[in-house]
Amino acid sequence: MEINIRKAIAEDAYDLAFCHISSWQSAYKGIVPDEYLEKMLIEKDQLIERYRNNIKDTGYPEYFCVMYDGKIVGFIIINISFDNEKHNIGEIWAVYLIEEFRNMGYGKEMLKFSIEKLKNLESEEIFLWVFEENIKARNFYEKNNFNYNGEKRENAWYGKPLIQLKYVLNI
């Protein structure tokens, strides 16, 4: 397995939207309501446009494409934030991979890439949010030294309230 990760460009927006929808529909089946997952295809044009505009912006968040045989099979979004107590807190917004590339080591490499990028920005801490019901993802992050810090948030934009847990990697 050879993983190639490169910075995303605006022309990648269609493929990023496809990966986003495909990965959500497989990874979140049974967690996010089916109606929401199905609606993603109908609203794909808005998602494409959002990615196109966000990638054009300079600075953060940063978007990276995961390539296999010249095709985008996943992507990463990282960001930095600041608060009053800590500086340079890194956040992993997305580690999305289409289903047929899961369980092959790509996810681990994508996470490692994200952590290294954020470490290079002198992040003191890296965090991400994961659905409470997504046991597979929670186990994955825990195996990679992220720990649930007790913080929860509720998101209701998916048609039902869903709880997300904050996982933190201390550097």
Image: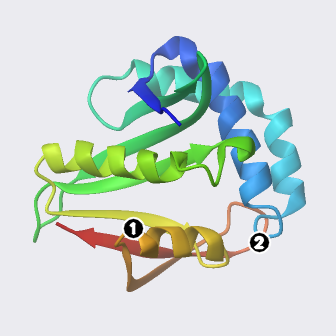
Which mark, residue 160?
2
**Where residue 23 sits: x, y (%)?**
70, 46
Q: Which residue is drawn at 53% across and 37% down?
A: 1
**Where residue 79 sits: x, y (%)?**
32, 46
Examine the rendered structure and indicate whether residue 69 appears above or below residue 17. above
Say which label, 2 or 1, has the lower sequence index: 1
Residue 41 appears left or right of 161: right
Which mark, residue 64?
none
Which mark, residue 144?
1
Q: Which of 111 and 42 is in front in this view?
A: 111
Q: Look at label 2 and name its amino acid.
A: Lys
**Where residue 52 sits: x, y (%)?**
54, 20
Q: Give residue 43's quadrant in the image.
A: top right
Please, which residue is most extreme toward the front here?
Answer: 1
Q: Which of 43 and 149 is in front in this view?
A: 149
Residue 40 appears left or right of 151: right
Circle 2 sits in a helix, a strand or a loop, which is it? loop
**Where residue 109 sits: x, y (%)?**
43, 47
Q: Dot 2 surroundings within 10 Å: few (below 14), some, or many (20 or more)?
A: few
Q: Residue at x 59, y 15 (%)?
A: 70
